[in-house]
Image: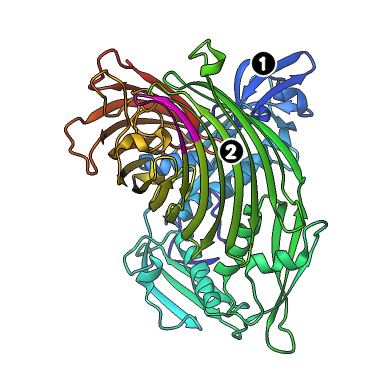
Amino acid sequence: MRIRGTGPKTGTAYRRTGTMMVMAAAAAFSPVLIGDAYAFKLFGITIFGKEEDEGEQVPDPVRYTVDLKADSADPDLKKALENSSRLVSDQKRPVSGDLGIVVKARDDRDRLIAALYEKARYGGVVTITIDGRNIDDLPPNPTFDRSAPIPVTVDIVPGPVFRVKEVQFGGDAASRNPADYDLAPGAEAGSLAIIKAGEKIVEQLKSEGRPFAKLTERKVVADHRNDTVDIVLAAEGGPVAPIGDVGVTGEKTVRPGFIQRYSRLNKGEAYSPEALKKAGERLRALGVFSSVTIHEGDALAPDGTLPMTIEVSEGKRRYFGVGAQYSTTDGFGVQGYWGHRNLFGEAETLRIEGSVSRLGETTDVGSLDYSAGILFTKPGAFFPAATLKAGIVAKTQNPDAYNATLVTASLGLSYELTDQDTVSASGEVRWERDDDAFGTNDYLTVALPLQYDRDARDDKLNPTEGYRATVSAKPGYEVFNATPYAAFEGSISGYLPFGAEDGVVLAGKVAAGTLVSSGGIENIPATQRFFAGGGGSVRGYAYQEISPYNDDGDATGGRSYVTGSLEARIKITDTIGIVPFIDVGTVADSTFPGFSDIRAGAGAGIRYATPFGPLRLDFAVPLNKYEDGTDYGIYAGIGQSF
């Protein structure tokens, strides 16, 4: 961005005039062993020990202290300046030699001027002195007294806020409304807003199918007499060109025809930056590739289309892993799995997994929960947007309400209607043996689960805005009791951010379900009746503790339920957050909940941000506990609770 000034400038300093589970993997725990120094880190935080002195790694180390002064700046601006200053952020790290501190100071001055420009402060002055001398007055090879850390002073006079006076759009960007680009007359003329406006214009032109759109002029003239700026933005759209031939490079075992087909970049379709972005995300989500890059041609083909190349790098085909989770109400659990990511050459996945849970909750090995299964996934089955899933899973489940042994075989197909909308249907056969309030019974069910899912969240593991809604129907037939039934469920969760950088996010979720059958509820397997309580619904209660009870005090499960949760996700630092929350829920033995027995739990949690999602630790108590029921619950996992 070119900035030209008019009117008087004062000051002697330089002015810039240019432009998930508690353990996700054992690798998360990283010991650092260097020489005699040692440390143990957890997700980048030193838990114990001492790391090697960083100064020993720097030749001719020179230490310094820094005093950043910006007395006339408001708190937000001063924080932004401090965050931009490498002198401030690196002051515990020595520089190399006396000249090293001068180079760092000059770079810092550029960074601070840029930070002022971002805040529309085009008249700001940054003065930096080292050991009392202005950095512009230092000789080429300065020397400093190293008997103590060298004092560095950064003095910043921010100057006034400059505002937009006039915006001119030229070329293919003509006749646009400045307000659409946050550049309405009178608005703050921050450099970042101007740069983003230019990028948005180019993006809009490219979205019209013009792959060679570019910005031809971006000029900013600052008037220091009136504290205003005039802005000129001009662009050239170039020709409209559809997608041409799409090649594939870098593949080894994955068939190139599958890669092109699954990307959904088809010759003759309209060019779109969004389509290219989604194609890359889609291919990366397969888990087969360690990297995916889509290259656009530098020139149009003779037929007027834009050729493209999908460059991939394949990752390891076989993988394995372990995980764990814990809560005081559900006990401790461990999982393990082995998988193959490219079974037949088209990213088919075979996964064998097993788990044991409720460890520590009981000493009876037979009362633990076990699970073992084989799952097969075929992306791009029949249609590029379709995924075939098949599996067989055997489980034992032993919550307080029942003991169940079951084997489930399923075959289903999901289809992506849009980037946000997915529909799925499957067939399911299940054998189950229950020991519960109705005695010991065997069940054989055949069901057809159907589901619609709309996911408009900005992030699946840590959403800050958007929503997700699901609706499902599961018609079925219990063979041994000749009982037809159908379960209907729905849920919606939403997220509303507040404050700078989404410092507070209000998150809410409501879910409900009803079970319709021609016979008594005892004719439906326990695992398909409704219960609530535990980390996935109403925290503070034991897993599936919320239920109708018979005269003997045994939980029977219900025909309907409603649950709701409300959280305030408050960011304390970039990595640490706290979350006060309240959950409510009711389960009834009628088709529609009567809300005669509403249970609520409340508590607070802590979140620690990691590259694979926030680590979650919640503590909750029941507000109206059952007699002899659970007193509190502690829950840990990866990702937000919903």
Q: Is residue 171 left or right of residue 606?
A: right
Q: Is residue 617 visible?
A: no
**Residue 628, how many percent across, how many down?**
29, 12
Q: CA distance from mark 1 to mark 2?
A: 47 Å
**Residue 371, how many percent across, how many down?**
58, 31
Q: Which residue is drawn at the image coordinates 65% and 66% (left, top)? A: 263
Q: Is residue 436 magenta?
A: yes
User: Among all residues in the image, which is located at the extreme bottom?
Assistant: 303
Q: Nearer the viewer, residue 203 or 431?
A: 431
Q: Is residue 286 magenta?
A: no
Q: Is residue 152 left or right of residue 443?
A: right
The residues colored magenta run 432-443
Q: Name the front one of labels 1 and 2.
A: 2
Kind of residue at disc 1: Lys
Q: Which residue is drawn at the image coordinates 62% and 64% (left, top)? A: 279
Q: Nearer the viewer, residue 487 or 108?
A: 487
Kind of residue at disc 2: Val
In the picture, residue 611 is in which quadrant? Answer: top right
Q: Which residue is drawn at the image coordinates 71% and 25% (left, top)? A: 54
In the rendered structure, which disc, 1 or 2, sits on the residue that comes first in sequence? 1
Is the residue marked by circle 1 packed among few (<14), some (14-19), or many (20+) residues within 10 Å?
some
Q: Which numbered marker is on residue 393?
A: 2
Mark 1 lies on a secondary structure that is strand
Q: Is residue 139 above or below residue 43?
A: below
Report which residue position mark 1 lands on: 50
Mark 2 lies on a secondary structure that is strand
Q: Which numbered marker is on residue 293?
A: none
Q: Nearer the viewer, residue 559 or 497?
A: 559
**Residue 137, how many percent across, how many down?**
64, 43
Q: Quadrant of the N terminus?
A: bottom right
